[in-house]
Amino acid sequence: MMNIVDIRALSTIAKKANAWLAVDNTFATPYLQTPLDLGADIVMHSVTKYLGGHSDVVMGALVTSNEDIQKEMYRIQNSSGAVTGPMDSFLVLRGIKTLHLRMQCHCENGEKIANWLVNHPKVDKVYWPGFPTHKNHEVAKAQMRGFGGMISFTLKGNRLEEALEIVKKVEVFSLAESLGGVESLIGHPATMTHASIPKEEREKTGVVDTLIRLSVGIEDADDLIADLQQALG
């Protein structure tokens, strides 16, 4: 699930406390949201995801408009040797050239799939910030230029076996833990990304047994919906 917070409000609180505000902007990318313009001091990205966009590089990035922070970042980088390789840099620069095109398609496909899922008889809840019913919809609407292609949903009855069967049946979606590539991915947090967390603790955050996460890619939306249809049955 995408965790959306009011960056302007948090920036105000941070400044009153004489603290820095750091924002992970991986899911939104600079195409959909620019936290520095909203008052953040540091923005971080898992470049592996949308910025690279092709699931072929492992990289992270920190961005700031604060000169003091920038100097300290450079000092740490210079002393620790955290410099990306030339091929990795090339792959990311290549990916950034098509970021706007890919993100637009991620958003369009995400909207179509979210609206299809919300009307499916086996689906209980759909988590996508584009829905007015999403608890942070107004915040997302105010500070983002689109709602992205990350979607989570749960099944009626909350039967673990049913969720596992669905993620195994997909053919266009790939069962994997990552996100942000041109290909669509499906994941089951309870047995994958959050498997090490005790059930009682993960369920407090909404990670129930049938929570399924989609990283919607840029394939044809109708093909993706047909794949989910055959998997859900």
Image (cartoon, rainbow, N blue to C red):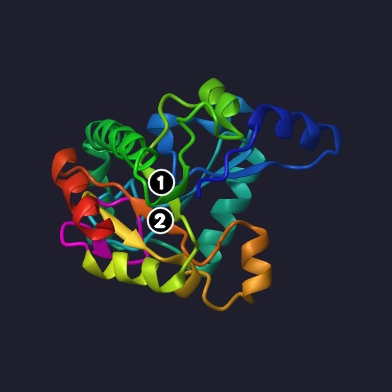
Q: Is residue 190 left or right of residue 161?
A: right
Q: Quadrant of residue 166?
A: bottom left
Measuring from the top left, give residue 103's x and y in whole percent: 30, 35
The residue pinned by badge 2 equals 213
- Residue at screen point 62% across, 66% down: 202
Nearest the camera: 45 or 197? 197
Placement of the C terminus among the 4 image quadrants: bottom left
Measuring from the top left, give residue 3's x and y in whole percent: 57, 45
Measuring from the top left, give residue 199's x and y in whole percent: 62, 73
Measuring from the top left, give residue 96's x and y in whole percent: 27, 40
Q: Tell me, yes or no, if residue 145 can be seen here.
A: yes
Image height check: is 132 above or below 3?
A: above
Image height check: is 225 above or below 111?
A: below
- Residue at screen point 78% across, 42% down: 19
In reply to whether residue 173 is colored magenta, the answer given is yes
In reply to whether residue 153 is colored magenta, the answer given is no
Which type of secondary structure does the marked residue at label 2 adopt? strand
Magenta residues, dominant SS class? loop
- Residue at screen point 40% across, 56% down: 213
Residues in magenta, as a range: 170-181
Could you tell me if the residues under marks 1 and 2 are in contact, i.e. CB atoms within 8 Å? Answer: yes
The number of callouts visible is: 2
Sequence-first disc among 1 and 2: 1
Q: Quadrant of residue 99?
A: top left
Which type of secondary structure does the marked residue at label 1 adopt? strand
Nearest the camera: 187 or 64? 187
- Cα–Cα gap, marks 1 and 2: 6 Å
The residue pinned by badge 1 equals 151
Q: Amino acid at mark 2?
A: Arg
